[in-house]
Image (cartoon, rainbow, N blue to C red):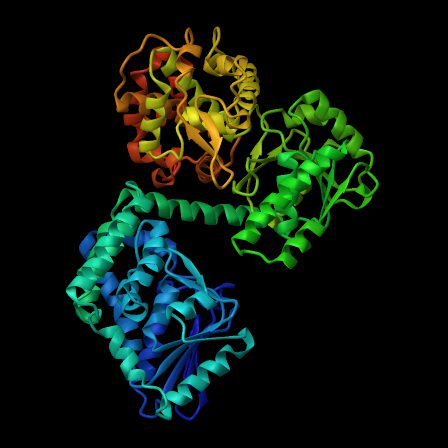
Amino acid sequence: MLYQGQSIRVEAVEEGLFNLVFDNQNESINKLDQATLGELREAVTQLSARDDLKGVMFSSAKSCFIVGADIKEFNQMFSHEEEAIVAALMELNQIFNTIEDLPCPTVTAINGIALGGGFELCLSTDYRVMADGAKVGLPEVKLGIYPGWGGTVRLPRLIGVDNANEWICGGVEKRAAAALKDGAADAVVAVEQVQEAALDLLRNCIAGKFDYMARREEKKSPIKLNQIEQMMAFESAKGYIGGKAGPHYPAPLAALKTIQKHANLPRDKALPIEAKGFAKLAKNDVTRALVGLFLKDQAIKKITGKYEAQAEPVKMAAVLGAGIMGGGVAYQSASKGTPILMKDIAEPALQLGLDEANKLLGGQLKRKRIDAAKMAQVINRITPTLSYGDFDRVDLVVEAVVENPNVKKAVLAETEKHLPEGAVLTSNTSTISITDLATALEKPENFCGMHFFNPVHKMPLVEVIRGEKTSESAIARTVAYAKAMGKTPIVVNDCPGFLVNRILFPYFGGFSALLSDGADFRRIDKVMERFGWPMGPAYLLDVVGVDTAHHADRVMAAGFPDRMEHEGENIIDRMFKLERFGQKNAKGFYRYEMDRKGKPKKLPDDSVDALLDGVVGSAREFTDEEIIERMMVPLCIETVRCLEDDIVASPAEADMGLIMGIGFPPFLGGPLHYLDKMGLDNFCNMAAKYEALGPLYQPTEKMKQMAAAGETYFG
């Protein structure tokens, strides 16, 4: 053994050939934290000093290669001044340069995931051999930064500027076949053959069959494009990348400009340019927000992982109600490998559910994400039924019938009689009290809420709602099932609207109040979309469904009459009375027509203004700032109330719930991050301007105390 550390060891393979193995002894994955980088520096230094060195393979003893850098440590580095960040990056780059400059051929055996800094390490070797199931990429733009360990320098020189723009500016992850096609991999083999193939490549280099120095020189030299070719490659990409990234995410364009800036320079002069641009992005508010979201996501994974560890797996599920929602739940369960019964009381409803699943699978087939055999396999996991005959082998049931407490209670009570001991019964209600629904059951401890968001296959969040008598084992199994379905579950306590809808309706309350004061709904939509929301409130109501929103609005008003009850008719009441339900019947605040892909296309409807007479006040101009403040203040205060009322357990879960549930702008980091960034004192002063609008605009006493003490939600 040439070298042995906690994360790295170096083994002799044969005379002059060595294997540098990443094998973190303290974790199930490999990552490039400071300790591992220190060991890498030492190991490579020892290798470079050997007189008998002929070749080095870099490999992993884990199922992944290297998942990337340690984001927590990165985040700590971001708190330093730009000059210090640049210096730290250049010091780390020296490790990768030493690998690239070793006096022998080098190859990486990529057996699994190699992302971010892990893939930048791969790029520093002369060749890369990938397992056919491995994935590589540079996803740093998703954190508001770009590759900082030579990725923007080496990749464009290896695979060309156009390909590198897609990889780096898009933050995409590439499977082995795509990486081979683009030139980022040199060979693709079965995972069990990766190391032998890599060693064979080294032996061929030693024998002179491959010119590894020519490959190395290409990565270290300027990009081989003349000025005209460079202008075409970079300038044409700016509009596309800028348009796709949008105005709130600067990293993709910054990455492109950095590549352009160092295109004519050799490696050692290009790396400082990369480091300076990286340091500037690292100090950006968007980066803080996006890195914060990554860390919050990791925290939620730890929380749900503890539930998973104590849960019995769901081997067979069932969904009650075979409409669009039921069909979506069935599709999601089956596509992720859990067989599911889909029960309804009528054949046409069952067919509707199957049609929904077939439509979703057909889209996957058309986009070549699955083949016909896989589609058939998934469909075969969905068993439509009109009876409870097979429910004696079900581990968990999702009730997804009409949003009516009496109907739900009757269905839940009937279903409970047919379930085996210990099976969990859940309700996909969006507003109805879980504690109340449980009164119809003999074993309320086996019952909880499992609130999916529509459309099920796209929305990542599932609210798992704990009722007063729900057992921890029921919560654990429901969380485990949600994760098995590929969703992110957040456990919340019972209240009207739970977490997401409870917070969403004060936002809609702000919207209604603006309209009653004379604002134009189209202008509000445009302002809020420019602010960063994927859709404005009027468009969102059309997508959610005005009939659904009307029902939820009444539940919220009854649950929180002090601030969510309203006198007289509001905008949701009027649209409901007019039966303008939004996309589901092609008319709402806007009108809708199907486009070529069968998706509803939003179009203006000039008839709406006259229909809203009486609930929209005399026309009045509002500044963008007024609109944003009047929309955001109620939402932020209600998020705080949910935290203070113990509806949600942590600020991280509150922020992630709103981002995944209703599309809160990720670059703002979530409502509580948004408050921290603004400062609670500034927020309370802003809210004071609107206190005459009522309790929705009045911060809690604890918020005021925290503001006076200069406290934050994330410390």
Position of the N terminus by quadrant: bottom left
Please give left or right for residue 207 compared with residue 274 in the image: right
Q: Is residue 257 above or below residue 59?
A: above
Q: Is residue 626 above or below residue 92?
A: above
Residue 366: horizontal and vertical position, in percent?
A: 54, 52
Camera sees residue 704:
no
Furthest residue in direction front, as rendered? 596
Residue 643: horizontal and vertical position, in percent?
A: 47, 30
| Residue 601 sits in quarter | top left
Please give left or right for residue 632 compared with residue 597 in the image: left
Name the residue located 53 percent from the left edge and 79 percent from the top edge: 193
Position of the C terminus by quadrant: top left
Name the residue located 54 percent from the left edge and 25 percent from the top edge: 585
- Comparing 325 with 126, the one in front is 325
Residue 244: horizontal and vertical position, in percent?
A: 33, 46
| Residue 697 sits in quarter | top left
Name the residue located 57 percent from the left edge and 53 percent from the top edge: 365
Camera sees residue 221:
yes
Number of marks in picture:
0
Residue 114: horizontal and vertical position, in percent?
A: 43, 65
Please give left or right for residue 465 compared with residue 417 in the image: left
Q: Is residue 273 above or below residue 454?
A: below
- Comparing 292 with 631, the one in front is 631
Name the residue located 58 percent from the left edge and 56 percent from the top edge: 370
